[in-house]
Image: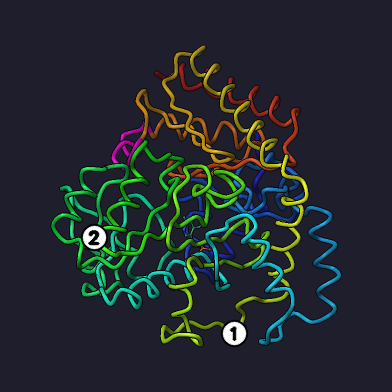
Amino acid sequence: MLQLGKSQKAFDDAKRYLPGGVNSPVRSYRSVGSTPPFISSASGSRIYDIDNNEYIDFVLSWGPMILGHANPEVIASLQEAIPRGTSFGAPTLLETELAKKIQAFMPNMEMLRMVSSGTEATMSALRVARGYTGRDSIVKFIGNYHGHSDSLLVKAGSGLATFGVPDSPGVPKGVAENTITIPYNDIEAVKSLFAEKGDEIAAIIVEPVAGNMGCVPPVPGFLETLREVTKEHDAVLIFDEVMCGFRASSGGAQKLYKIKPDLTCLGKIVGGGMPMAVFGGSAKIMSQVAPSGPIYQAGTLSGNPIAVTAGLATLSILQRDPTIFKSVEDTTERLCEGYRKLAAEHGVPVQVQRVGSMFTIFFTDKPVLNFDDACACNNDHFQTFFHYNLERGIYYAPSSYESNFMSFAHKAADIDTTLEIAGEAFREIAKNM
Ligand SMILES: *Cc1c(COP(=O)(O)O)cnc(C)c1O
């Protein structure tokens, strides 16, 4: 049905020059065993591939495009900015304007620094936390993703508190050993770890709404516990809101769950589709960053005027019309409610988990609270669902461990079409059960 001839050729060609044919692994469609459509353009809720297939897009560049693709106002501000020059490596008015804008959404960001990727933001936030506390160990949760820096590319083996085993060749054992991993949403594991080693721990880094094992909300008391133990032991609490920042709510997870982290990392939406990210938080901690303090951090393209322009335009639109968040969230809930009803009609066990405008359909009959739960889902059902949809023009994340996203450009007709095809896909799954 779906013609991907040109994409197939392009993929073969790309594989000769780029590892796996891509610049980021999940784009290769390896986990779904097929050829990724090569994208030529995108507009609103739609993306188009080089074979002229059209898709309703729920990946949205993995989150950034909350206003939909090629928002006319964002594009116009870029067109205005580009002729003035693409990079200066010097301060601009735009950067302070964006910092103020971010602070309006997230008052905890008393001071912040702009970087070029989420990876850079979390890596730098960790350095700041370590420099500030004078401690080396950090805590991360199994199944949370914080970019690909050495300290954070660590997964757990079995057991409750596993001391770092590198997740990738090339990560030094000595670095990984400083990363302690425990299960997400496990309040007792957090408490016992801190009772034992709290005074050696520089920071907890957490996705306050997990998105990188699929959408997994924090259980009641989880984030509160993180706040308590870090406070008690003078460790730094880092919220990695690179994904959930402007998705869980207008002020991210910290606003939704009313928890004040010490440091926050933002990315994705904050750059409006350009390479931009941010870390920041209390002025006391952030003033330790060079040149006002001793903790070194720098970047040639940090605060790049084009990236900042895209971020500023995006946040300005969101700030001017605060109903956008509610509207996007309502659309997401309507879609999720639709999935639940259709899956039930066809007798397919699913958990449709949603926070704000992030959502995942887990093929399982019990709620997914952590990475083990996510791994226990039915991957055959996911594969059937994914391919059935892609072939009919619905573009979901090509892995069961991912969140999908909604944009303001997705309208009722998009949702109707999406649900119609989802219903057929559930029927297809039911046939093979
Ligand atoms: C995407 C993501 C990152 C990494 O951001 P990049 O820009 O891909 O480096 C870090 N943390 C979370 C929670 C993310 O979703």
| Residue 130, image quadrant | bottom left
Q: Is residue 146 magenta?
A: no
Residue range (magenta): 369-378
Say which of 40 and 359 sits in front: 359
Residue 20 in the image, given as x and y percentages of width and height: 48, 62
Residue 358 in the image, given as x and y percentages of width and height: 55, 41
Quick one: SS at disc 2?
strand
Q: Which amino acid does the dot numbered 2 rest on?
A: Ile
Q: How many residues crowd mark 2 within 10 Å: few (<14), some (14–19), many (20+)? A: many
Q: Residue at x 17, y 48 (%)?
A: 160
| Residue 330, image quadrant | top right
In the image, residue 268 sits, relative to residue 172, either above or below, namely above
In the image, residue 37 sits, relative to residue 296, either above or below, namely above
In the image, residue 130 sits, relative to residue 221, either above or below, namely below
Which numbered circle lies on residue 289? none
Between marks 1 and 2, how big is the CA–CA gap? Answer: 32 Å
- The residue tagged 2 is 180
- The residue tagged 1 is 300
